[in-house]
Image: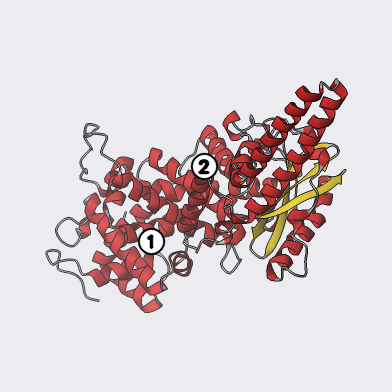
Amino acid sequence: MAAAQAGDRVALDALLRRHQDRIHGICRRLCGNEADALDATQEALIAVVRGIHRFDGRASFTTWAYRVTTNACLDELRRRARRPDPGLPDVERPRPGPSFDEAIADRLLLDDALAAIPEDFRVAVVLRDHLDLDYAQIGEVLGIPPGTVRSRIARGRAALADRLGGNQDAAPNVERGAP
Amino acid sequence: MSEHDPTAPWPEQADELVSARLDGEATPEEAARVEADPVLRARLQQFRAQRASIAVPTTLSDADRERLLRRALDAFDTPTATSPWPTPTPSPTTADPPAPAAAVVDLSARRRRRRLAGALPAAAAIAALVLGGLALLVASQDDEEQFRAVGSGIESQQRSDTADGADAAAPETPAFEDDEESSAVAEAGSADSATGEAPTTTGGAAPTELGDLGEVDDPADLRAPALDALARSAAAEADPGDAAPTTTAPPSATVTSTRPGGPVCDPLAAGSVDPASLVGEGTATVDGAPVVVLVVSRGTERVVVVVDATTCGVLARG
């Protein structure tokens, strides 16, 4: 880490390789499609490289890198939102099937559902469910208290379940419960 | 918590309870409540399935992986494969082709622009000398040796006037005056916003002219003179009466004679350093080859980067 901060390219290369997959994972889940995820990953890696000399070690490197990545992804999403719509024809998405498990197995549905939930909830859910960070770590990344993290994750999951058809009108059917 | 009416709206607090239970963040009492309620247990299974789906690792192709890494590292540093000196810390990406030719610009042209105001009177003086010299030549019909003597005087005057003009113009001239460098600084600021941290302000001031730092055999030996020159300049700015400014150092004949007006590398355009962190810039000669010496700020630390003036390759960093 110190070597990378001092400008050692080999150390920096190794550091980026170590974290690249997880950085891409955050971007992939937050952006909802691979093309935007690659752009966001690029921005995140460049932001890490350019900002590494300002990393002061108060948080862990992963916490800092995830914060940088999250910001880069959200910036990319905002840039995408400002770009004109290319006008591609709508793709017919498969409708949720009767089985909740089948529905969430559909990657397109998951991407769409994640993209549709509020940004604050989506980030918290992705940091929890994709990176397996605990509430305290997520709070450190996002700069919010753990209680807020808990609330955002719960509301994000509930919104996701709504989108995926698992909680359409009322409480879930008990008969469709645990396997 | 009692069992839910299947037709009742889903209570938000119940989701928070179930979600915390799934994450192992619920208290023992909260966990027991979820386990005791079949409706909450069913919700727990939904959330668990969602989590499993989101947790599926994403895949990044080897080509994308290398491309992303190369571009990120290029943003940090751009050593070239043509550098005659080994890069201190080579990485696999250093085998990539050097930066596009567009990164190499004529540094002397940019410096000419900076010094234009100071050089104009010098040009007028030179023109007057040339005319006077020619008049003498025609009038006296002197031999060729006398003509050479006049020409030598003109060249001497030109060097003197140009150096004076540069010294006078340098302190007022912003370091990043063209669009290319301004955009580089703006880009660095954008990266800062991405990190959520305040951008450093060192890039806003013109880097200190360190002058010629002499000739050495090892590029690493330039660190101490560069930092000394920077310190002297800072002292001179603090109290101009005590310390001699570094820009008064005599120009190095070695550096100027090895690249008489030819294209040289612009280390800022080539991305050798982050322009926003540049605090000092000088020249030197390493083993007979001209180099550019850059001092950049990394937090409280000063890092000296020695760049080959022709190839833009980084010779030393430390």
- How many badges with numbers are in the image? 2
Give the left or right position of residue A6, taking residue B203 as reference. Answer: right
Give the left or right position of residue B81, taking residue B191 as reference. Answer: right
- Quarter of the image that includes the N terminus of chain B: bottom left
Q: Nearer the viewer, residue A80 or B117?
A: B117
The type of residue carrying mark 1 is Ala
Q: Nearer the viewer, residue B12 or B256?
A: B256
- Whether residue B130 appears in this view of the structure is yes
Q: Determine which of the numbered discs, if any, sits on residue B180 in the image.
A: 2
The residue carrying mark 1 is A124
- Whether residue A24 appears in this view of the structure is no
Give the left or right position of residue B264, taking residue A138 as reference. Answer: right
Q: Position of residue A155 (x, y in %)?
A: 28, 64
Q: Nearer the viewer, residue B281 or A20?
A: B281
Q: Nearer the observer, disc 2 or disc 1?
A: 2
| Callout 2 and callout 1 share a chain | no
Residue occupying the far bottom of the picture: B29
Within the image, what quadrant is residue B239 found in? bottom right
Is B238 above or below relative to B90? below
The type of residue carrying mark 2 is Glu
The colour mode here is secondary structure
Residue plotted at (39% across, 52% down): A75
Badge 1 element:
helix
Badge 2 element:
helix
Residue plotted at (77% across, 66% down): B243
